[in-house]
Amino acid sequence: MMSEQARWHLKISEEADRQVRGYLAERGYKKGDLSRFVEEAVRWRVLDRTTEEIRDRFTDLSDEEIDRISQEAIRFARMAKRTG
């Protein structure tokens, strides 16, 4: 849930506006849901870009080495969550 809000003033193409509003309307979303939809889309895109940037930094590693490092990071995060 959004605790504090920032106001954005965006300009998008009419085609994109029709697409997103049609998508939301078909699924029963209300007018106020557009902000939540955009926020979720922005968060996913930032995650996607960040992941891509991280992958680019590790192109010299094998898939197995990346998997090992990922699993180690997951174990560390879970352990920190339990103790913190």
Image (cartoon, helix red, strand yellow):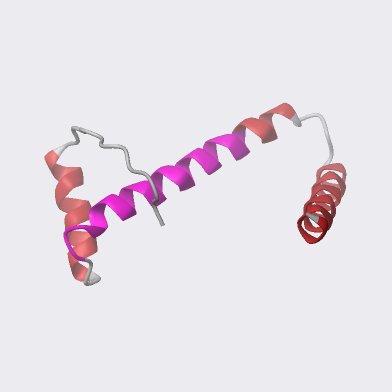
Most extreme residue toward the bottom is 28
Image quarter in which the N terminus is found = bottom left
Q: Is the residue 54 above or below the residue 21 in the image?
A: above
Residue found at x 16% / y 37%: 13
Seen in the image, is 61 located left or right of residue 55? right
Region in magenta: 30-52
Residue found at x 79% / y 48%: 70
Q: Is the residue 49 above or below the residue 69 in the image?
A: above
Image quarter of residue 16: top left
Image quarter in which the C terminus is found = bottom right
Residue found at x 18% / y 32%: 11
Q: Position of residue 67 (x, y in %)?
A: 82, 49
Q: Position of residue 7 (x, y in %)?
A: 25, 37
Q: Is the residue 68 above or below the residue 81 in the image?
A: above
Q: Position of residue 83 (x, y in %)?
A: 83, 57
Front in this rendered view, residue 58 or 75: 75
Q: Is the residue 67 above or below the residue 62 in the image?
A: below
Residue found at x 32% / y 48%: 38
Residue 37 lies in the magenta-colored region: yes
Q: Position of residue 2 (x, y in %)?
A: 39, 51
Seen in the image, is 3 located left or right of residue 65? left
